[in-house]
Image (cartoon, rainbow, N blue to C red):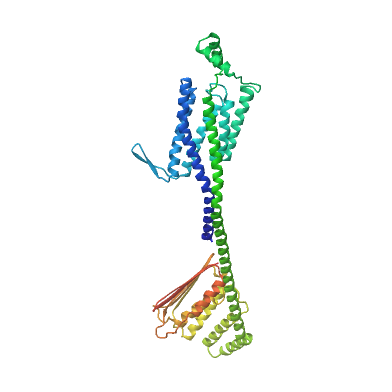
Amino acid sequence: MKSEEVSLKELLQRSRQQLLKPFAKTQRRLLFLLNVTYLCLTPIYLVSEKLATDHFVPHPVLGWVYALVGTANLLSAAYNYLRLTDRKGMNLMGKRVRVSSDERLDGAIRWSSVISVLIMSFCHMSGLGNPSSDAILTDFALGHSLIVLVAMLLGRPASIVWFVVVLGLLFYVSFFDKGYSYQYNYLTPQETTRYELALYQQKPWALARRAALQANGLNPPRISRYFNTWFVFILIAFLAAYFCLGITHDVFKVIPTVTETIKDAIETTKREELEREREKNQVEEQKLLLRQETLSAELKHLKAQINPHFLYNTLNYFYIRSLDLSEDLAAAILKLSDIMRYSMQENLNLVSLDEEINYMQQFIALHQLRNDNKLFIRFSVTGPVGEKRILPFLLIGLVENSFKHGKMNTVDCPLIIAIDATPDQIKFQSSNRKNQKKRVESNHIGLSNMRRRLDLTYETYSFEVDENEIDFSCTLLINT
């Protein structure tokens, strides 16, 4: 049953992996392209900022942020390149660095790469180092596009958190930092030319105006700044849309394969269910057949009892008449009477183990009388036998087998019978020397019938026979 469950789980797990594989592969490609894009655009941005303002970054804190983002994206790009090309490692400074396909490492690199970009975007949206105080015009566009990116790379919960952050910053800048009625003022081309010429000529009014603008963080925005920001925004939006559609397309391609796998899983389950039902029916049929055979045997047994009360009364009459003739004869008739009474009882269900033992003792005593008490038999009983119940005539069959095939007329080779009862078990053991002179061919039908009776009655038992040309022994363990 467990192996069947494992097989079904493996089939369903395979289907799940087939459905997730397109998403995982597309997710890795998207992250790799974003890593490469950032690594390529960052030098361009730094150089353009240097040419425009004579500084690589407008604020020292942004330098550390860019370094963090660059390091995270460089590691992510190298790792994802190795995974996409199915390489196990790479040479780094003369040393071979191995990369394993560990899910925890994969998730850590993906999260560190994306989180670093989110930190950079947060700094930009909050206005850190913004020379024109126009974050709401440009940087929020990047933050908005990252919502979709985070959903694809980090999942819904992370996307919801970033959405709340962006929306919260938007409200803060619009209502508390700038004010909802704040407006941006622009110059016409003629005014711009006049103003720049005045700056070039070092006119006091132009210099004073520039100083006032710089003091309030209102430097005139340059087109290069908008180009860089919107280029990244458009690129991220395109990649997110392209790869999102690619995931859907790839999933549709694997659906037929997944359908076949699930179909195989269903058919396998049906076959296993039918097989279990067939085995169950076979067991029930065998039990029914054994019950029918048992009932048939009981019927034959009852038919053989030609007026058992008459036979029992007759034996009692012989016993009374023989008391005056021979005590041994009277004892033999009495024992035979007890044996017949036990064997012809109508209750054929479980009997007390004590009764079965008494029946065995009467049987052994009768054989001793037949052989002038020349048989050597060691019979031992231990444990609470009066509290145990057992199938009638179960153990006597083993004893009869010993008398039929055994030799027990020497003290060195006695018939040994041991019965031990414990709270959870009944144990029967017997051993005897085989009679080499009086060899009776055995087909073990009696032992086979005994096994079938045990199968019908007890859930767990063991019966072991050990014999050779000289000796015979058997052990029966019944869990009660």
Q: Residue 470 in the image: state x and y as whole percent.
A: 39, 79
What's the residue at 58%, 29% (across, down)? Answer: 140
Locate the C terminus by quadrant: bottom right
What's the residue at 55%, 59% (across, down)? Answer: 265
What's the residue at 54%, 11% (across, down)? Answer: 206
How many numbered marks appear?
Answer: 0
**In the image as oriented, which residue stretches furthest toward the right?**
181
In this orientation, which residue lies closer to the viewer: 92 or 458? 92
Quadrant location of residue 473? bottom left
Compared to residue 95, the image places residue 46 above or below, namely above
**In the image as oriented, which residue stretches furthest toward the front?**
190
In this orientation, which residue lies closer to the viewer: 27 or 347? 27
Q: Residue 102 in the image: state x and y as whole percent.
A: 46, 44
In the rendered image, is residue 251 in sight? yes
Quadrant location of residue 246? top right
For residue 239, side relative to residue 84 (left or right)? right
Compared to residue 395, the image places residue 316 above or below, namely below
Q: Residue 119 in the image: state x and y as whole percent.
A: 52, 30
Quadrant location of residue 188? top right
Q: Residue 375 in the image: state x and y as whole percent.
A: 44, 81
In this orientation, which residue lies closer to the viewer: 200 or 44? 200
Compared to residue 86, the image places residue 218 above or below, namely above
**In the image as oriented, which residue stretches furthest toward the top?**
204
